[in-house]
Image (cartoon, rainbow, N blue to C red):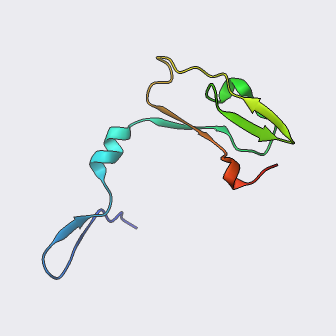
Amino acid sequence: MPDISQITLPSGTTYDIKDAAARAAINGTFTIAWNGTSTPVVEDIPAGVTVKYNSTNYTGTKVADGTTLGSFYLVKAPSQGDN
């Protein structure tokens, strides 16, 4: 099935559904730093980010540098539940 990126209403007005320019601008990588299902590896979690697992707090130590430019590190949020 093809992707739909625009829609044109009967009035003739066309709307973008998928923002190709924004997607191109992101042009990064997404890494799951911690998904909440096992003991966190603090070296994989961004520095200063604290996660809680089995009633123990773990604070990330991964420092931003030239190798992390354009990368997004995803960490389970506390609002998603507390293990």
Q: Residue at x 43, y 30 (%)?
A: 70
Q: Give x and y (percent) for residue 11.
A: 14, 80
Q: Give x and y (percent) for residue 75.
A: 64, 41
Q: Is residue 12 left or right of residue 27?
A: left
Q: Is residue 82 left or right of residue 5?
A: right
Count of labels shown?
Answer: 0
Q: Is residue 37 above or below residue 39?
A: below
Q: Is residue 26 left or right of residue 64?
A: left
Q: Is residue 65 left or right of residue 1?
A: right
Farthest residue toward the left? 12
Q: Is residue 58 above or below residue 38?
A: above
Farthest residue toward the right? 54
Q: Quadrant of the N terminus?
A: bottom left
Towards the viewer: 45 or 9: 45
Q: Residue at x 50, y 17 (%)?
A: 65
Q: Give x and y (percent) for residue 26.
A: 38, 39
Q: Residue at x 82, y 49 (%)?
A: 83
Q: Give x and y (percent) for residue 17.
A: 31, 63
Farthest residue toward the top? 66
Q: Is residue 80 above or below residue 12?
A: above
Q: Quadrant of residue 53?
A: top right
